[in-house]
Amino acid sequence: MTVSNRRSRRPLPAPQPRRMPNFVLRRRLLVGLLSLAFVMLVSGVFYRQVIQTEFLQREGEARYLRDAVIPARRGMITDRNGEPLAVSTPVETVWAEPRKLINHLDAIPALAGALGMDAAFLRDRIESNRDKGFLYVKRRVTFDEARAVREVIAQHKIEGVDFDSEYRRFYPGAEVFAHVIGFTNIEDRGQEGIELAYDKVLKAEPGLQRVIRDGRKRTVQQVEQVSPPHPGHDLVLTLDRRLQYLAYRELKAAVTEHKAKGGTLVVLDVATGEVLAMVNQPSFNPNSDRSGGSERRRNRAVTDVLEPGSTLKPFVVAAALEKKVITPASRFSTAPYNIGRNVVRDVHNYGTLDVTGIITKSSNVGSVKIAQLMSYGDLWTLYDQLGFGHSTGVGFPGESRGILRHYSTWRPFEHATHAFGYGLSVTSLQLAQAYLVLAADGVKRPVTLFKRDPLTPVSATSEEARLLSQSTTRRLRAMMETVVSEQGTARQAMIAGYHAAGKTGTAKKSAGKAGYSSNRYQSVFAGFVPADRPRFVMVVMIDEPGAGAYYGGVVAAPVFQKVMEGALRLFNVSPDDPEPSMMLAQQAQGATP
C-alpha cells in the first residue's frame, strides 16, 4: 500500500505551450503561387497576342464572319436570230488548303489523275505552298472531273480539298465564229474579238455577301447580302448562224482544195450594211485549242490587207462616168501600152474594147487609159470616199486602215497602177464596203456587226453619204453582169435563177524590195446578187493558192457561187432570171416520179 501510494502521488508534468501556425511561410507560398500563375498568364497573353497574332486572327476569321463573292454571269452573245454564240455556264473550281493537304501526299497521284494534271507538278505546288491556307488546284473543271475528285476525296479521306462555284465561257460555234467572237481568259476578261472590244458591256459585276465559314472554309450560314450581283449585258450580232456555217465550210474546202495559205469571206446586207457572215482560214477552237499565235487567231477580214487588183477597175469606170469623160460606148485599144520605161499589158491582146468589154475582159490597159482621162485627184478622191485608208468603224480590235497614199506623192506610173489595183492596200471588209456603194445605188452605208450598237444611243444614227449617182451605178452593175457570164472571167460565179454581177481580181503579192513575187498570188472575187436590185454583197479572198490555179475567177468565184446560192435560199430571195428558173422548174418536174 505504501509503495503504490507513493507512485500515485508523483507530480504531473507541466503543460507544454501551444505552438502557433507559421503564417509567414504560408503567405510566401501563396504569393509565390499567385506570382507564378500571373507570370504564366502574362506569358500566355504575350505569346498569343504577339507571337501567335497572325495565326489566331487567321483561325478566328476562318471560323467567323467572312465576305464571300457572289458570282455573276457574263453577258451572252447571240446571232441575229437569238442563237447563242457565247454563253457562261456555272461550273465548279477545285481549291485546297496546302497545310492540310500536305498530310495526304500519298493521294496526290490519284487527285492529279482525276483532274487530268501531272502528279509531280501538283505535288510541287502543294509542297511549295505548304504554309498557305488557300490555293487553286484547277479552275472551272468539267462535270466528270468534279465527280472524279469527289470519289478520290472519299476514297482517300482527304482533308483540305473543296469546291467553289464560278462561270465558264463556252462557245457553241467553236472555230466557225472564233475570229469574230474571240474568247476570254481564266478571269473572264475578253482577250480577242467582240469579247475584247465590248468587254465593258459584257463584263459582270459580282455581288458580295457576309457568311460564316468553318475551319475548312465551307459556308455554314449566310448572314446578309452586302451587294447584289449584276450580270453583264447581252449582245445581239448581225451574223446569221446558218450562213456563217455555210460560208466557213465552203471557204475551208476551197483553201484545202487549192492548198492555200489562208482565206477570207465577208457577206453584207445591202439594205442595212449589216455583216451577215465573216469567216477566215486558218481558224482555232476557242473552247480548247488557242495555240498557234496570231497566225490562227487574228480576224484576217479586218486585220490583213491585200492589194485588190482588178476588183478596183469598176470604180475607175465609175469615176470616169461621173466626170463624164467617157460613155459606155467609148472605145479603147488594149494593145501593150508604154508609160515611161514601164509597159502595161493584158494577159491577151483583146484589140479594141468598149467600156463594158474592158470590165468583162478585165483589161489593165483599158482601165489605165480611162484613168488617164482624169486627174490624179479625181481617182484618189473616190478611193478616199469609199473608205480606203480609213477604218470602217465596225469597232473591231486591231482593225487595219489599209494604205492609200495621197495623190500628191504619185508619179505617172503609180497613177496607172492605182487604176488596176496595185500601189494601195485594203482589207476584205473595206473592199466589201466599197462594193456596197455600187450595190446601194451609189450610197455609202456604214458597216456594222450589231443591229444596234450597245454603246450608242438609239437616237444617234449614222448618216449615209451619196458618192455616186444612181444612173452611174446601175450602168456599172449592168457591165459587171457580163463578168459573171460565159464571156466573162467569172463564169463559175453564175447562179441559176439569178443575175449576178461582180469582178475578179488576181494580184501578185509583194516581195518587199524585190518587187512582186512571180508565184505567190491572192485570188479575189467581189460581187452582188441580184444584179438589178442587190440584196447581198460578198467578197472572197484566197491567199496564195498553191495547186496550180490562181486566177480569181477559178479559185474565188466558185466559193462565191456556193455561198451566195445558200444565202439567197436562207433569206428567201426571189429569183430574178425567169428563163433559168423555168428551166430548173421543168427539171424538177421531170425528176418527180
Image (cartoon, rainbow, N blue to C red):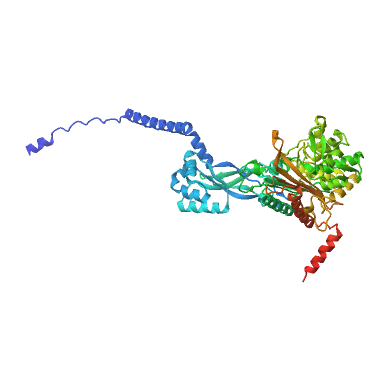
Residue shown at the point (80%, 34%) measured from the top left: 413
**Depth check: 236 or 574 in front?**
574
Q: Quadrant of residue 392?
A: top right
Residue 488 position in % (x across, y down):
82, 50
Residue, far bottom:
593
Residue 408 seen in this snapshot:
yes
Quarter placement of the N terminus: top left
The C terminus is located in which quarter? bottom right
- On the image, the x and y values in percent for residue 383 come to 82, 38
Residue at coordinates 62% horizontally, 50% vertically from top-left? 90
- Residue 414 point in image, percent of width and height: 80, 34
Number of marks in the image?
A: 0
Taking the image as shown, residue 190 lies to the left or right of residue 592, namely left
Question: Is 389 placed above or below 170 here?
Answer: above
Question: On screen, 355 above or below 577?
Answer: above
In the image, 110 versus 481, the foreground residue is 481
**Which residue is found at the position 83% from the left and 35% from the top?**
380
Residue furthest left in the image: 2
285 and 199: which is toward the camera: 285
* Residue 472 as seen in the image, left or right of residue 92: right
Whole-percent x, y for residue 561 in the image: 77, 54
One can see residue 446 in this view: no
Q: Which of 209 and 224 is in front in this view?
A: 209
Q: Horizontal placement of 206 versus 486: left or right?
A: left
